[in-house]
Amino acid sequence: MNIGDLFVTRYIDNKILLLYVKCTNKGALSMQQIKTARIGLRATLQQQSLIRKAAEIRQQSITEFILQSACISAKNTLLDQRIFFADYKCWKEFTDALESLPKYKPALENLFSEKAPWEK
């Protein structure tokens, strides 16, 4: 468990108790990341025009734009999930982690002791 990052990720029997997603879109695709799945959709002419204009602004293909936008929306939906299922043992570990005292971090204390730039 990693409480310091304010997210708790716990995998029990291949089930996720809480989810934290780190998105990285840079770099080349490895052999495991080659895109083989297809997603088909239909759109109105207005929707197609809107998407094409936005993709042009980002200098992306329409496919890249749609896929990136859909993945961002999907990740946000997963992060916004409010109900989590856990057996007693998982729940106990989770609540114990939440109720434990935070770790002392001198660098964080120093950061908070400084005035904000707009207060100087």
Image: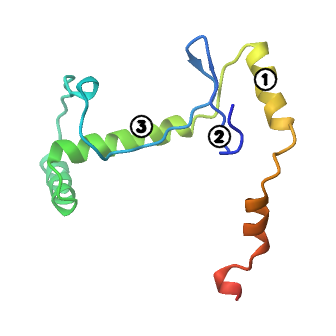
Q: How many marks?
A: 3
| Vertical order, 30 against 4 (above or below) | above
Looking at the picture, which amino acid does disc 3 mark? Ala
Which residue is the extreme one toward the front? 106
Q: Are marks 2 and 3 in contact (CB under 8 Å)?
A: no
Looking at the picture, which amino acid does disc 2 mark? Phe
Give the CA distance from mark 3 to mark 1: 28 Å
Residue 105 x/y as whole percent: 78, 54
Looking at the picture, which amino acid does disc 1 mark? Glu
The secondary element bearing badge 3 is classed as helix
Residue under label 3:
74
Which of the two discs, 2 and 3, sits closer to the camera? 2
Q: Earlier in the sequence, mark 3 or mark 1?
A: 3
Residue under label 1:
93
Q: Quadrant of the C terminus?
A: bottom right
Q: Earlier in the sequence, mark 2 or mark 1?
A: 2
Residue 80 x/y as whole percent: 56, 40
- Residue at x 40%, y 42% (from the top left corner): 73
Residue under label 2:
7
The secondary element bearing badge 2 is classed as loop
Give the CA distance from mark 2 to mark 1: 14 Å
Q: Earlier in the sequence, mark 2 or mark 3?
A: 2
- Residue at x 74%, y 80% (from the top left corner): 115
Q: Quadrant of the N terminus?
A: top right
How crowded is the residue under tag 3: few (<14 C-alpha within 10 Å), some, or many (20+)?
A: few
Which of the two discs, 3 and 1, sits closer to the camera? 1
- Residue at x 28%, y 44% (from the top left corner): 27
- Residue at x 80%, y 36% (from the top left corner): 98
* Foreground pick, 77 / 4: 4
